[in-house]
Amino acid sequence: MGILPGWRLGLGGLRSQLMALTAGSMLAALALLGLRMAGEQTALARPALTAQAAATARSIALGAENPLLDNRLDVIEELMLHTAELPGVRGAWVVDPAGVPLMQVLRAQPGEPPQARYAKPGERLVAPAEAAPRIDDPPGAEALAAWHPIV
């Protein structure tokens, strides 16, 4: 009987045991390296996604200025439908300062075309208190929310 009862696995001699231990160590090291690389790639991609969300919100805001003044919600709807077709965009909203949605475009599932949705009476969104560009990026969230005022 050996020093440790667990060494009697039928692996053969010391050489086979060392090879098994080395292979197991390498697999564990590769798994840890993969986790670390995935975390680093996520950290590198986040600023690019944040910048893309801010640019998309700014684009909607700038494109909606004149149609809002002329009360042409059909032009805003078309702008938002085209914007919501961009990869990774789940939805877009234009809200007034009180948080009442003037126009909403949502994508039900990834890969499906975006659909215009109209607010129900009394429906409100929580708009930022300050009319300034802003990114909401809560930790662990799967989506970013980008706000940009229409002035």
Image (spheres, rainbow, N blue to C red):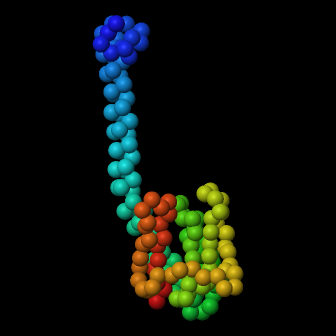
Residue found at x 47% / y 66%: 144
Give the answer, above or below, for where 72 lies relative to 35.
Answer: below
Name of the residue lying farthest toward the bottom: 69
Q: Quadrant of residue 74?
A: bottom right
- Which of the two residues, 50 or 136, is positioned nearer the viewer here? 136
- Which of the two residues, 122 or 69, is positioned nearer the viewer here? 122
In the displayed structure image, the side of residue 131 where residue 79 appears, left or right: right
Give the answer, above or below, for where 19 lies relative to 120.
Answer: above
Q: Quadrant of residue 103?
A: bottom right
Residue found at x 55% / y 70%: 83
- Which of the two residues, 42 or 8, is positioned nearer the viewer here? 8
Residue 94 point in image, percent of width and height = 56, 80
Give the answer, above or below, for where 101 lies relative to 34.
Answer: below
Residue found at x 34% / y 7%: 1
Residue 125 showing in the rendered view: yes
Residue 148 point in image, percent of width and height = 46, 80
Residue 114 point in image, percent of width and height = 64, 66
Residue 134 point in image, percent of width and height = 41, 76
In the displayed structure image, the side of residue 151 where residue 77 appears, left or right: right
Residue 94 showing in the rendered view: no
